Amino acid sequence: METISLEKVQASVGTEIGVSPWRVVSQTIIDKFADATDDHQFIHVDPERAAREAPFGGTIAHGFLLLSLLSAMTFETLPEIEGQSMGINHGFDKIRFQAPVKSGARIRARFFLADVNARPSGWVQVSYDVTIEIENSPKPALTARWLTLTFVEPKQANA
């Protein structure tokens, strides 16, 4: 995996830092997410009923499924910070689900680096403005401010 210095990350604030590859949101993925979360609403898991009764023309992905896919899209897109030993989710601000993702659609994420706050303890809070795009759609699936914490081994004073 590619790595990047903390200094270079800090210098990249305000820029787009990555676009993930396209990925298909299949009915199988939607069904597995429904099983994992016990959210079996028909608009997600019943293609025939969703085609008849929902305004989307078929099933759609759960909004929380799209959020959960951000982790995978991050790992396949963004480099790690040099000295990073782990990263964790810290939360989201202003999540907006803007357009449904139909079963079989392709999505990708765009990452804009909004802010970096390096703490003396080694924790680095990174804020991304994230957009999940739907292929051939003028509207994104979602936009959010994503807050993460990454632990970067503090540099030794005499190193």
Image (cartoon, grey):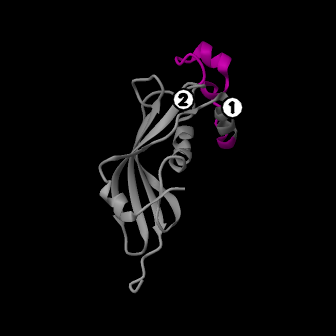
Q: Quadrant of the C terminus?
A: bottom left
| Relative depth, front residue between 156 and 42 | 156
Earlier sequence position, callout 2 versus callout 1: 1
**Label 1 element class:** helix
The residue positioned 48% from the left and 28% from the top of the image is 134
The residue positioned 35% from the left and 60% from the top of the image is 8
Residue 96 position, x and y percent, is 41, 37
Position above or below: 116 against 55: below
User: Pointer 2: what residue?
Assistant: 106
Residue 39 position, x and y percent, is 64, 36
User: Pointer 1: what residue?
Assistant: 28
How many marks can you see?
Answer: 2
Image: magenta residue range:
36-59
Q: Is residue 145 magenta?
A: no
Q: In the rendered structure, which amino acid carries the disc numbered 2?
A: Arg
| Relative depth, front residue between 25 and 46 | 25
Q: In the rendered structure, which amino acid carries the disc numbered 1?
A: Thr
For residue 96, say whether it is visible: no
Residue 98 position, x and y percent, is 42, 30
Residue 42 position, x and y percent, is 64, 25
The quarter of the picture where residue 57 lies is top right
Nearest to the eye among marks 2 and 1: give it.
2
